[in-house]
Amino acid sequence: MRLSPVCAALVGLCALACASAAFAADPFYKGKRLTLLVNFAPGGPTDIEGRLLAKYLGRHIEGQPFIVVQNKDGAGGLVGTNYLGEVAPRDGSMAGYFTGAAWKFVTDPESHRVDLRSFEFIG
């Protein structure tokens, strides 16, 4: 039995799709740890909000990374903000949960060593 050219092409495409799915790369965050930097002290409202976010955020990121919360408090949240902008790794392994930092930047940008416009904001 011979297949028509259209049928043969479809069978070839299906085989190619199956093969490419088998060799597809794992999601970036699979098996990795994501650090969520909170720019206020542990136990306060910002920390509680950040920890609640961390508890559920991993479920919504492809690869479902393990999320660890790290607090960097001081100077009304500027220590954590500056740390993320100047010291933190830029490999996607750290994100920031900052409350009030953006408003402080808008009202007094000179008090920041880091330009918040260079950050990628999610929400």
Image (cartoon, grey):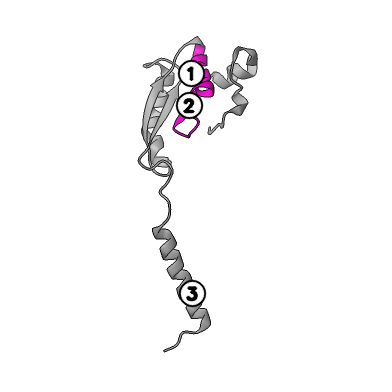
| Residue 43 in which image quadrant | top left
Q: Is residue 107 left or right of residue 85?
A: right
Q: In the rendering, at what x and y percent does residue 81 appear?
A: 52, 20
What's the amino acid at mark 1?
A: Gly
Q: Residues within 10 Å of mark 3 (few under 14, many from 20)?
A: few
Question: Can you say whether 43 is above or below 59 in the image?
Answer: above
**Which residue is drawn at the image coordinates 41% and 41% (left, top)?**
29
Q: Earlier in the sequence, mark 2 or mark 3?
A: 3
Q: Nearer the viewer, residue 86 or 76?
A: 86
- Mark 2 — residue? 96
Q: Earlier in the sequence, mark 3 or mark 1?
A: 3
Marks 2 and 3 sit apart, C-alpha to C-alpha, by 47 Å
Q: Nearer the viewer, residue 72 or 20?
A: 20
Q: Earlier in the sequence, mark 2 or mark 1?
A: 1
Marks 3 and 1 sit apart, C-alpha to C-alpha, by 55 Å
The reply to whether the C-beta atoms of the residues labelled 2 and 1 are less than 8 Å apart is: yes
Q: In the rendering, at what x and y percent does residue 80 appear?
A: 48, 18
Residue 10 numbered mark, or none: 3
Q: In the rendering, at what x and y percent does residue 84 appear?
A: 50, 23
What's the amino acid at mark 3?
A: Leu
Label 2 residue SS: strand
**Which residue is drawn at the image coordinates 42% and 25% (left, top)?**
50
Point out the stretch of residues depicted in magenta. Answer: 76-99
- Mark 1 — residue? 80
The reply to whether the C-beta atoms of the residues labelled 3 and 1 are less than 8 Å apart is: no
